Amino acid sequence: MNDQFAYLKKYSDVYDAVLEVNRRISQRDWTVSIQKMRTAAERMLKHVYQLYGEVSRDLDFCNSINQLHKAGIISQKSAGNYHRIRMIGNEAVHCNVNYAEQETRGVYGVLLEESVLFAERYMVQTDPHGRERLRRVALDVPAPAAYSAPAREKRNNAYKYKVR
């Protein structure tokens, strides 16, 4: 049997999370699969963060994305993708939003794109100055704020997200 996620086996927690996402999608459990996508993405970034610095218990997913991007460790596009997965995942968990197949598969594509970058670039091509830049960035970031759902507005029966 061909394992399409073999590139993640080195990171068993990420591998297991992506397998669970894939299983939920095959069961057509769209909302739970989005929740699991958020978990997988958070685990990936935790590994990247650990490569360059210590992960604090107080560091939330949003701040870790912002810090890694500001330190130049992850790209702007990756930061945007992680924020998209984070916000939609939060909405699925906290706002009881039910997602359709098309939207779920769109987010899944983003997760798969980031999982390849995670395994092939972010965890392999380490930046020798990344640790120091991340340390400096981490010292400037304020404590995490309380959760707030992403702003949404409905246009033509489709939700558009506003980044805050």
Image (spheres, rainbow, N blue to C red):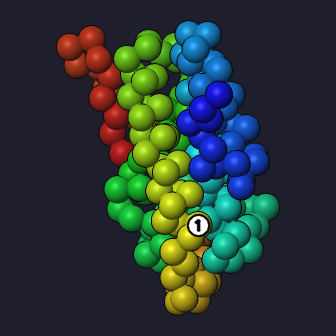
Query: Could you tell me which quadrant the N terminus lies in?
Result: top right
Residue 55 position in % (x across, y down): 73, 67
Q: Is residue 93 left or right of residue 70?
A: right
Residue 26: which quarter of the image?
top right
Judging by the rendered image, the residue that carries numbered circle 1 is: 123
Task: Tell how many labels.
Answer: 1
Residue 42 position in % (x across, y down): 63, 49
Q: Is residue 156 left or right of residue 6?
A: left
Instruction: Note whether residue 145 is visible.
Output: no
Residue 130 position in % (x across, y down): 54, 83
Residue at 53% across, 57% down: 118
Front-most of residues 61 and 32: 32
Front-most of residues 76 and 5: 5
Q: Is residue 71 left or right of residue 77?
A: right
Q: Amino acid at mark 1?
A: Met
Name the element at disc 1: loop
Front-most of residues 140 and 135: 135
Instruction: Note whether residue 99 is visible.
Output: yes
Residue at 60% across, 50% down: 7
